[in-house]
Amino acid sequence: MKRTLYTEDHEAFRAVVRTFLEKEVLPHYAQWEKDGIVSREAWLAAGRQGLLGLAVEEEYGGGGNPDFRYASVLAEEFTRAAAPGLAIGLHNDIIGPYLTKLATDEQKRRWLPGFCSGEIVTAIAMTEPGAGSDLQGIRTTAEDHGDHWVLNGSKTFISNGILADLVIVVAKTTPEGGAHGLSLLVVERGMAGFERGRNLDKIGQKSQDTAELFFEDVRVPKENLLGELDGAFVHLMTNLAQERLAIAVAGIAGAEHLLELTTRYVKEREAFGRPLARLQHVRFEIAEMATECAVTRTFVDRCIAEHADPTGLGLDPVNASMAKWWATELQKRVADRCLQLHGGYGYMSEFPVARAFTDGRIQTIYGGTTEIMKEIIGRSLLG
């Protein structure tokens, strides 16, 4: 079915993104995978190309365009290029809204120009060794010392953890407040007591630096409180719908790309003297995946349109959870089935289907696991 989501302007932007990937990302990607981290120059190149801070006001160097469809185009093209290591989506779609919606004018002047130029790489630190989706389990504390906070604790699985110059840390500021006693504090590179642990060894997305972070008596100025004191829970919940939609966009784009690759492969690969595509089982596999992708694409595109509608309230959190759950689980199933259809070649890391299998496996975990998505949906229906 013909997609009607994008205009000519969106497709022109898509061409810009593809050119950027061809020139600035793909020639270096194999080296980044070996290094376990992307280069700083890639972030600066993205800033020069105008790919960072799409929704940030122009006065701070951003694109000044809050239309989420541009972010969706970015996610689709980076997914199809199999280049998740340069985590522009995390920077723009997940962390960006915290800075544009919660930061004071003074904070915006300090942080947003570098955010848009690529000089400031960002991360958000929520997950702890003993606390993932359960915010009440967070143990990192921030004590009020008059003109500053004293931050103590640790975080893990933090994307951009090694490169990040600015980290939004979820910390307990009112111990007896539970999930409603948490605040967002911005920790900057070079603050005394802020240390990074190892660059974690993952099964996929090798070039995307993911780290442990440690905070020992870090003095965080009161001016680095982001949003309301003890307001982190509400702030986090407000932004989760966009985060989950962004993951869903990558999920369906990944599934569609794998289907394209595998369709070409089974037409060319022969077994028993004829192309694999002539075997009924293979045709049924392709037919099933194509149908599932088409149905999922329709729903995700509707979610994107609703979230991008300037006259509406944005995407409902329950629908965002549905999109995230369904699209990422589909991506996982399609990756497994496409790898199987590639046979032994599918198990070789130089084949795109093998990399997609390992790179995409995190999709059903981060941003809220599939199980959490089902809990959110079920709770909305059953109370």
Image: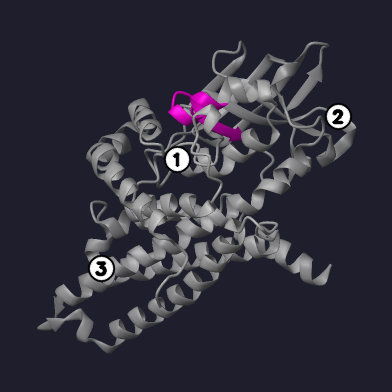
Report x, y in % for residue 23.
24, 39
Q: Is residue 114 magenta?
A: yes
Q: Quadrant of residue 172?
A: top right
Residue 129 makes an appearance in the image = no
Residue 18, label in figure: none
Report x, y in % for residue 30.
26, 40
Which residue is at the far left? 273
Identified at 36% across, 57% down, the residue is: 11
Report x, y in % for residue 68.
53, 52
Q: Quadrant of residue 232?
A: top right
Q: Earlier in the sequence, mark 3 or mark 1?
A: 1
**Tag 1 near tag 2, CB within 8 Å:** no
Which residue is at the far right? 176
Residue 174, label in figure: 2
Mark 3 or mark 1: which is in front? Answer: 1
Mark 1 or mark 2: which is in front? Answer: 1
Query: Looking at the rendering, in which quadrant would you find the N terminus?
Result: bottom left
Q: What amino acid type is highlighted by mark number 2?
A: Thr
Dot 1: what SS? loop
Q: Could you classify mark 3 by the number of other residues whose Cα lies within 10 Å: few (under 14), some (14-19), or many (20 or more)?
A: many
Which residue is at the far bottom? 280
Q: Could you classify mark 1 by the number of other residues whose Cα lies within 10 Å: few (under 14), some (14-19), or many (20 or more)?
A: many
Q: Could you classify mark 2 by the number of other residues whose Cα lies within 10 Å: few (under 14), some (14-19), or many (20 or more)?
A: some
Dot 3: what SS? loop
Task: Give the residues in magenta.
Answer: 112-125
Report x, y in % for residue 266.
22, 75
Circle 3 is placed at which residue position? 342
Identified at 59% across, 54% down, the residue is: 244
Q: Is residue 374 magenta?
A: no
Circle 1 is placed at which residue position? 87
Q: Earlier in the sequence, mark 3 or mark 2?
A: 2
Spatial separation of the CA atoms under disc 3 and disc 2: 54 Å
